[in-house]
Image (cartoon, grey):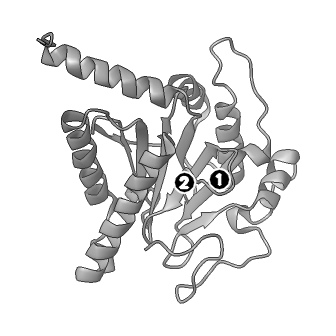
Amino acid sequence: MQFGYVSPEQFYKDKADYARKGIARGRSVIVMQYEHGILFVAENLSRSLHKISEIYDRIAFAAAGRYPELESLRIAGVRLADLRGYSFDRADVNGRALANTYAQTLDAIFTTQPKPYEVEIAVAEVGDTAADDQIYRLTYEGSVVDEHGYAVMGGAAELVSRHLSASYREGMSFEDATRLAVDALGRDNASGEVRQLTTDALEVAVLDRNRMRRKFKRIPQANLRELLGNGDAPPASGPDASAEPAAPSTEEPTEEPPAS
C-alpha cells in the first residue's frame, strides 16, 4: 500500500492546530508582577492537581493545558534545578537557563514526536527589585517570549490579555493585582459576558521578594475569601496575612513539600 505524501509545511501545521485546540479547552492562567514580586492566578477546580508550583528558591512554574504533560515538565524542571544547585551553587539556578531548557525540550517533542505537547508554560523568577523580575512564556513548539508586566496562557488568553492591557499598571498592591487578575479571568467570553469566579475555583500563589530564601507561597482560601468577598476591606498584611508565619530559610513551607 502506498502512503500519500504530506508536505512538511502541512505536517507541522496540522500538529500546531492539534496543540492549539487542546490548549484552548483549558482555562487561562495569569502571571503578573505586583509591588513585592510576582503573582500567579489560575482558574482551577482541583485542590490537589496544581497548575502553579515552586521550582526552586526564587523560581516558580505555571502552565495551562493537558495536566499529565505539564506535570512531567514541572518534575523535569525541579530535577534540573536541584541538580544544578547541588553540583555548583544555588545562585547558579536561574529562570532564563530553565526557560531555555524547556524551549529545547518542547521543540524536540514538537519536531520529532508524533503528538506535540498540548501545553503553554511560564517560568518566573523574582529578583531583588522589580526591574530584576523575569517572566518567560513558552508555547507548545518551544518559542520563548520574555514578558514584561504580565503573561497570560490558556484558551482565552487573547480576551484576558485585552482586559489586562487596559487596566494593568506597574507597582500594583497584592490586593489590587489579585482582584484585577480574577476579574480578567472571568472575561473569557467573546460575547462580553462576565463570569463571577468563586474562591473555590481559584489557585493563587506568589513569589514574594520580602520572604526569606524560599520566595514561593500559596495563598490560603481564607485569605482569598476575605479579599474577594469584600473589596473595601482587603487583608491588612497582603499575601502573608494568615495564621501561618513566613517560613525562615531553615524550615520548609507547610503549603506543599519542598521541590525535589
Q: Amino acid at mark 1?
A: Val
Q: Choose between 117 and 192: the one closer to the eye.
A: 117
Q: Which mark is residue 204?
A: 1
Image depth: mark 1 or mark 2 in front: 2
Q: Choose between 169 and 150: the one closer to the eye.
A: 150
Q: Residue at x 32, y 34 (%)?
A: 116
* Quarter residue 248 falls in: bottom right
Residue 3 located left or right of residue 71: left
Is there any visible trace of residue 231 in the rendered image? no
Residue 92: percent from the left, percent from the top?
A: 27, 73
Dot 1 falls on a residue whose secondary structure is strand
Q: Marks 1 and 2: CB-CB under 8 Å?
A: yes
Q: Quadrant of the C terminus?
A: bottom left
Residue ranking furthest to the front: 1
Residue 70: percent from the left, percent from the top?
A: 44, 48
Residue 71: percent from the left, percent from the top?
A: 46, 53
Q: Earlier in the sequence, mark 1 or mark 2?
A: 2
Q: Residue at x 57, y 82 (%)?
A: 252
Residue ranking furthest to the bottom: 250
Residue topped by disc 2: 52
